[in-house]
Amino acid sequence: MKNRELFSKINQVIASKDSAVAELISAESHRQRSTICLIPSENYVSAEVALALASPFTNKYSEGYPHVWKEGNLIDKNGRYYQGQENTNKLEKLAIQRALELFTDNPSAYHANVQAISGAPANLAVIGAFLKPGDTLMGLALDYGGHLTHGHKVSVTSHYYNAVHYTLNEEGKLDYDEIEKLAEEYKPKLIISGATAYPLKIDFERFGRIAKKVGAILLADISHIAGLCVTGEHPHPFPHADVITSTTHKILRGPRAGVIVCKKEYGPQVDKALFPALQGGPHMNTIAAMAVAFKEAMSEEYKAYAKQVVKNAKVLSEKLKEYKFKLISGGTENHLILIDVVNNENGVTVKNASWFAERLELAGIVTNKNTVPGDAKPWNPSGIRMGTPAVTTLGMKEKEMEKIAELIWLTAKHAEDDSKIAEIRSEVELLVSKFAEGSNFII
Ligand SMILES: *Cc1c(COP(=O)(O)O)cnc(C)c1O
């Protein structure tokens, strides 16, 4: 049975009791099958990941861990608060083991925590593990591609901690000399390397040297690029970083959750900072799906996938350049592209990025508006962010990237023309449905 048929059967079960929700599920499935997803943080999961999420593990409360810490050593002993944990303990240990195999080349030197409900709580836990309120952390500014949880002013990470920020230089690149200067000046206890909208490679080795010099812990938040780091498509943060955090639902193609991997010596404080300091019971069904996704990410197929993601991004960016779009940082070295649509040089005037993102959506191309370096207002940014993880999961290759670039260009050129936009939409639907129809993934 094709995955789509399988899920439509499952939805019929829901429909027999609750047509309102079933209709929405069906409509969302239709939306995903008839639009091109270029949001770089989204993806499609396998049937195995989706079904693990729907498993009876969702019924179980498992506060605590399947291990205890004693004088810095992990002891294989039930550390839960409720009874009935024989399977959850085995499952969480398996997920931890797989996380260690996936993210490190020496599992015994590291510890993994798989309980974070998502990426933001994973970061909060790590910050809480190393900092007291008022201590200083340093991260990339949001308007230059950093994440909210890297100390942005609306985030608790700046309300409870003293957040300082580095930015990008005029070429849209991380300026490591500047980062080093700032680190020496502010002496942060924690430095966060990682971004949500940075198209170039990150030099974790240099970050590691800077952190060491000022006595800071280095957190590599690789939510966006985890799949590239574990397949060799991007330099790996270890051994330079002390801790890695990552979402598991972006390029990793797992359930919506967060994973933390740290040097073993930090295991006790990281575990404690997540539970009981920040969260209650872990979502064991999510942990089951994570274990499945980690295994998938260690396969040869996934390696080929990651390679294609990068290739596709390269082709898409080169084509967009041919259409004279202005690419932030000059292009891409990963899965992600950021274009400044307000100040582009192709003769097209776009009112603003929000409006253009809406026009693209009408054409069936789903992206997100994003700040670009120097944007004063995050709610009215000048950029559009796009990436290739989702389209690559569908099996699209270089040829389709060229087509998508052309469709983006046509949308920009005819942005005010509703009938032209409708024509582009038909082309988009044809293109996606061809790939979605036979896909092994849930779409
Ligand atoms: C997505 C992202 C997060 C947060 O993940 P959520 O699951 O949305 O909480 C944190 N850091 C970075 C760099 C991200 O890209």
Image (cartoon, grey):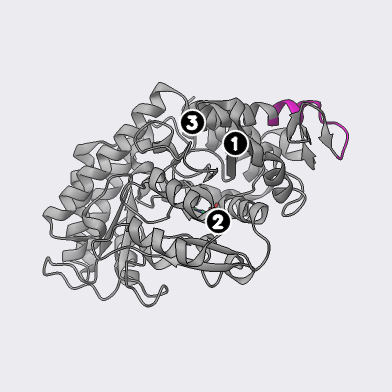
Which residue is nearer to you in this view: 196 or 399? Answer: 196
Q: Amino acid at mark 3?
A: Asn
Marks 3 and 2, the one that precedes in the sequence: 3
Whether residue 365 is visible: no
Determine the CA span between mark 3 and mark 2.
44 Å
Q: Within the magenta stretch, is there residue 86?
A: yes
Magenta range is 81-92
Q: What residue is disc 3 on?
A: 3
Q: Quadrant of the C terminus?
A: top left
Q: Secondary structure at mark 1?
A: helix
Whether residue 415 is visible: yes
Q: Secondary structure at mark 2?
A: strand
Mark 3 neighbour class, 10 Å CA radius: few under 14, some 14 to 19, many 20 or more: some
Q: Is residue 369 left or right of residue 288?
A: left
Q: What residue is disc 1 on?
A: 10
Q: What residue is disc 2 on?
A: 190
Q: Nearer the viewer, mark 1 or mark 3?
A: 3
Q: Within the magenta stretch, is there residue 229?
A: no
Determine the CA span between mark 2 and mark 1.
46 Å
Q: Is residue 96 left or right of residue 254?
A: right
Q: Is residue 353 left or right of residue 318?
A: right
Residue sitting at x 36%, y 46%: 203
Determine the CA span between mark 1 and mark 3.
11 Å
Task: Residue 128: give x, y in percent of width and height.
Answer: 66, 56
Q: Amino acid at mark 1?
A: Ile
Task: Residue 53: give x, y in percent of width and height.
Answer: 63, 37
